[in-house]
Image (cartoon, rainbow, N blue to C red):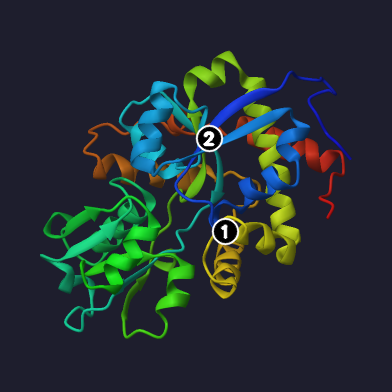
Amino acid sequence: MVLGAASIVFAIDNIRVSYATLSAAYMDHICAMDKGYFREENLNIEVIRAPGGVATPGLLSGQFQFSSSASSAVSAAVRGGPVKIVYTNLSRPSYTLVSIKPDITSAKDLVGKKVAINSFGDTGHLATILYLKKMGVNPSSVLFIAVGRNEVRFPALKTGAIDAAPLVPRDMVVIKDQKHVVLADLGREIQLVWNGVATSNKLLVENPQLVERFLRALAKGREFARRYKDETIALISKRDPSSLDAVKVDYDVTRAAMTDDGSLPDDVLRDEVASRSELTKVAKPPSIGTVFDYTITRKNYAQLKGAGWQPAR
């Protein structure tokens, strides 16, 4: 069944979407692209590779219509940036904080050490900061080094160029045969907006139908990914150069971290805004409605459910 906005036929829109990477964490997007759900909405997606520290300024300047680096966008919105998180796919980071240095066995041993992250303010960075604070370690005593991409961060750890790093599941598969120390499973220790979609307030006001079409296609891709594991892993593997075993692990961890309907309850959002405000030194935290707006996502899910829509192979 094809569900559109009251069966309205839209002209084809070319939209630019930023991605830090196209791994299992973004399998909702991958499935929406490869299963034709974006095409059903007459959307042509231009994939732009950009980490969160680049994606959010690009969103603010109008270079992108959507950013998949929702975590970085939360920080920008808390500081007053005119962006909103409109969809949250994953609510717990799948990072594992790891060191290969034998003298580093706990968070306290990271004082004065180098920790590799993709970009400042991204999920790996913030999750590590929150964990350090939880363990009584001042994050300013740790030297965070932004390396740009997952593909750079992992080799930097393996070669000893840095002392520790938050690693994604596929990296943990590769490193299993190398001696290492797991300092923390950050998904168990920390909860935050890990993965989702942000857009500008301007686009939400001026073209809410475009946002709705994009998010409806994404919801369909998400439900396909949830239901059809083998097919989804095959689609991920076309874009992710990791081993098949690594992709399978990544898929399982990602699926387990998914929210029910692409949104989060208000109490989680309040904690998120409070934590981000503290980390970014914002004296007065904004209201959650200033940072998050799940109206369209929840509407799309309700319509899909009401229509009895189910993904097909």
Q: Earlier in the sequence, mark 1 or mark 2?
A: 2
Specify the amino acid type for callout 1: Ala
| 260 relative position to 197: left or right | right
Which residue of the protein is positioned furthest toward the top in this rendering?
206
Q: Position of residue 280 (x, y in %)?
A: 25, 40
- Seen from the viewer's position, the closer of residues 265 and 258 is 258
Is residue 166 positioned above or below 199 on the image? below
Identify the residue at image location x=74%, y=30%. Answer: 41
Count of numbered circles in the view: 2
For badge 2, the amino acid type reads Val
Q: Which residue is mark 2?
A: 17
* Residue 141 image position (x, y, % from top left): 12, 59
Residue at 35% x, 48% y is 122
Residue drawn at x 61%, y 34% is 45
Screen quadrant of the C terminus: bottom right
Which quadrant is home to the N terminus? top right
Mark 2 crowdedness (10 Å alpha carbons): few <14, some 14-19, many ≥20: many
Residue 157 lies, with reference to residue 271, above or below; the image says: below
Q: Please give the residue where the numbered disc 1 appears in the rendered image.
A: 24
From the top left corner, tell me how far across and down residue 131 is, in percent: 30, 62
Residue drawn at x 87%, y 39% is 307
User: Viewed as shown, does residue 82 lie left or right of 221?
Assistant: left
Q: Secondary structure at mark 2?
A: strand
Towards the viewer: 142 or 174: 174
| Crowd tier of the residue under label 1, counting other residues whose Cα lies within 10 Å: few below 14, some 14–19, many 20 or above | many
Residue 160: image x %, image y %?
A: 22, 73
Q: Quadrant of residue 287?
A: top left
Depth order, front residue of 304/154: 154
Q: Is residue 161 depicted above or below 76 in this figure?
A: below
